């Protein structure tokens, strides 16, 4: 292979790859319905075509096999029939051979007068006619003497030409093999005075020897009409095969008999008998430009070969009709497959198109649309059902998030309002006025700084956590302001383990609880009041307790507040309720919005007197909240 050949192969390979890639690009641009229909059609068409081709060629091979077997059987049977007939014909020739009159006439040495010769010929003719009465197919028996070649004795249905001698016979001089006692001469036109009729005969020829001395004294020829083959040669054709041809042929290709009577007495054209097997066989052969099946059988007795030819197109003719019928059936089935494939593809793609349209509505923000899946129980219907459930869940989540955001804003506003309590602000300003009149400027500065700390702390992001220390600093600022108002009427204590000062808590969680204890628990107490902030760790839960030793909370008020805590995540705060109650509900709502309903506020009465507000929230250390938010993002 030279360089140009390699370049051509490479170019051809690249061209094919490019064509495949281009076809794949076109395939990818087609919609799912077209792909499904084409795939179904191609798959079933390929299956039908493959099945049809396999069935057709299998049938051809099977019919060819059956035909060959039948041809071989027929040729063998015909050969056997010819042998049996020839055996009987040979027996007839032997009876003539051994006849005393024939032996005397053919072996006579003296010369006879014309009258005696005529009388003897008449006797022989009558005798030969009597011997062939049971042989209607025998056209004539001819006896030739060796001593006088011009002398012929005969009996014949039609007389030979005047002056007919043995020298005019095509087989003379006779050359016999040592193993043969007779010769079968192939069919030829009968040589009689009525040869214009075209009667054809074949002949059995044998030498005549003197019985006593064994000396060769003459010849005998028996002519048999060729029509006898019509009775001897019959065969059974395959019911699906016709137009078979039968020949009885000599070794040199001379046709003894042609069932169609076109080549009888002629040479068989286009077939060399020497090229065919010498004994029984079957197979295929080309003759006159067409393929044929053949079966042959050669007789060692007659030296003739029975050859039966069947054209291949006669075998496939019936199958072609079946093939055409199958093709039309396959075309109908293919059309049916296209229709069924189209219906199946439509059943798959139509719900998907509806789902795409629904998704586009959802993409535009319409979450109220739903797929209609009534009566659909297959996978597509299940997909639509799950899609509707997803939309329901998504709509519920959006509604919850939307409501939660609104409530969070409300909670912030209420908490801010709680921080800017007009009463608290009025009392603080009154304290500042009183301290100013007294000239206690340092106290005024301290109260003002504490008040500023309260307001400034309230302006930061409330959803962010701070260390517990910062939240306690806010409580300290609030307590400082209240100390100037209540003086020594209450004390403030903390019970907090040192390691818990670094835990993270939400802003403005403790100060409203302390304010609630001051306003509702100790405001009417003249002395001995105590507010305690305790912090403890319970596993992964942080518990903050703000307690007082005031008058306690009535059962009805406590039950009412508990109910408001339970409904905090359902209803928004009621601004018509008293101010500090709103602040407590706001704390409950913020905790549950951020951490879940398992966290929040609990109000209990202390056995020794007073009230305790228990705040439960998850235990978070510095850095954990940012990590959780990062993973959530």
Image (cartoon, helix red, strand yellow):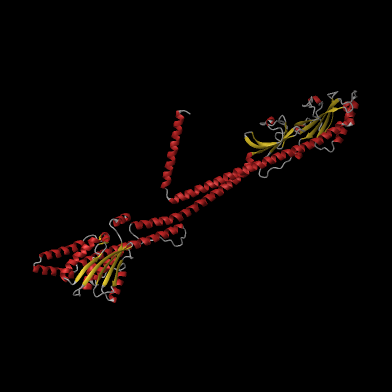
The residue under the point 33% across, 65% down is 598
The residue under the point 45% across, 38% down is 16
The residue under the point 38% across, 58% down is 358
| Location of residue 151 by image quarter | top right
- 425 lies above or below 3: below
x then y, percent, for residue 4: 45, 29
The front one of 209 and 256 is 209
| Location of residue 66 by image quarter | top right
Q: Is residue 4 left or right of residue 214?
A: left
The front one of 397 and 331 is 397
x then y, percent, for residue 201: 77, 33
Res. 257 in view: no
Q: Is residue 215 left or right of residue 279?
A: right
The residue under the point 66% across, 41% down is 65
x then y, percent, for residue 626: 29, 56
Res. 407 in view: yes
x then y, percent, for residue 132: 84, 36
Image quarter where the C terminus lies is bottom left
How many labels sit on residues? 0
Q: Is residue 490 left or right of residue 165?
A: left
């Amino acid at each position: 292979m030279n360089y140009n050949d390699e370049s051509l192969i490479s170019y051809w390979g690249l061209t094919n790859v490019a064509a495949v890639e281009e076809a794949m690009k076109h395939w990818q641009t087609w919609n799912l319905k077209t792909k499904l229909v084409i795939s179904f059609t191609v798959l079933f068409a390929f299956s039908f075509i493959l099945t049809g081709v396999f069935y057709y060629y299998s049938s051809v091979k099977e019919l060819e096999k059956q035909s060959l077997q039948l041809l071989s059987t027929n040729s063998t049977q015909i050969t056997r029939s010819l042998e049996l007939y020839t055996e009987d014909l040979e027996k007839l020739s032997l009876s003539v051979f051994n006849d005393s009159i024939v032996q005397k006439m053919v072996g006579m040495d003296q010369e006879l007068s014309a009258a005696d010769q005529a009388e003897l010929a008449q006797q022989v003719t009558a005798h030969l006619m009597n011997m062939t009465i049971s042989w209607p197919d025998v056209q004539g028996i001819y006896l030739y003497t060796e001593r006088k070649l011009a002398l012929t004795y005969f009996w014949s249905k039609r007389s030979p030409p005047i002056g007919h001698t043995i020298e005019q016979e095509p087989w003379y001089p006779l050359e016999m093999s040592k193993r043969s006692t007779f010769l079968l001469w192939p069919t030829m036109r009968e040589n009689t005075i009525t040869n214009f009729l075209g009667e054809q005969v074949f002949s059995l020829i044998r030498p005549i020897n003197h019985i006593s001395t064994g000396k060769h004294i003459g010849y005998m020829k028996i002519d048999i009409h060729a029509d006898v083959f019509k009775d001897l040669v019959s065969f059974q054709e395959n019911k699906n095969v016709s137009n078979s041809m039968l020949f009885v042929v000599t070794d040199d290709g001379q046709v003894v008999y042609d069932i169609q009577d076109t080549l009888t007495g002629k040479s068989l054209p286009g077939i060399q008998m020497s090229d065919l097997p010498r004994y029984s066989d079957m197979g295929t052969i080309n003759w006159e430009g067409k393929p044929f099946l053949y079966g042959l059988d050669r007789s060692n007795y007659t030296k003739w070969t029975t050859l039966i030819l069947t054209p291949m197109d006669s075998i496939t003719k019936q199958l072609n009709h079946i093939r055409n019928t199958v093709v039309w059936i396959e075309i109908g089935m293919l059309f049916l497959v296209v229709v069924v494939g189209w219906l199946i593809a439509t059943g798959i793609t139509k719900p998907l198109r509806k789902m795409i349209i629904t998704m586009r509505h959802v993409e535009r923000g319409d979450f109220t649309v739903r797929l209609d899946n009534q009566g659909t129980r297959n996978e597509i219907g299940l997909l639509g059902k799950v899609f509707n459930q997803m939309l329901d869940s998504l709509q519920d989540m959006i509604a919850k998030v939307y409501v939660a955001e609104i409530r969070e804003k409300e909670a912030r506003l209420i908490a801010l309002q709680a921080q800017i309590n007009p009463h608290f602000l009025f009392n603080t300003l009154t304290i500042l006025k009183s301290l100013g009149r007294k000239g206690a400027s340092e106290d005024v500065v301290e109260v003002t700084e504490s008040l500023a700390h309260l307001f400034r702390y309230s302006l930061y992001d409330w959803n962010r956590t701070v260390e517990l220390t910062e939240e306690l600093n806010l409580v300290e600022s609030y307590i400082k302001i209240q100390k100037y108002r209540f003086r020594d009427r209450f004390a403030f204590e903390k019970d907090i383990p040192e390691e818990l000062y670094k835990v993270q808590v939400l802003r403005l969680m403790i100060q409203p609880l302390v304010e609630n204890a001051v306003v509702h628990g100790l405001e009417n107490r003249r002395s001995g009041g105590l507010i305690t902030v305790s912090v403890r760790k319970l596993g992964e839960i942080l518990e903050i307790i703000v307690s007082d030793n005031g008058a306690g909370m009535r059962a009805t008020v406590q039950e009412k507040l508990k109910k408001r805590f339970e409904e905090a995540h359902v209803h928004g705060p009621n601004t018509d309720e008293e101010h500090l109650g709103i602040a407590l509900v706001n704390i409950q709502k913020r905790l549950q919005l951020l951490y879940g309903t398992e966290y929040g506020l609990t109000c209990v009465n202390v056995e020794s007197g007073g009230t305790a507000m228990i705040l439960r929230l998850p235990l978070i250390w510095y850095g954990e909240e940012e990590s959780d938010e990062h993973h959530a993002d």
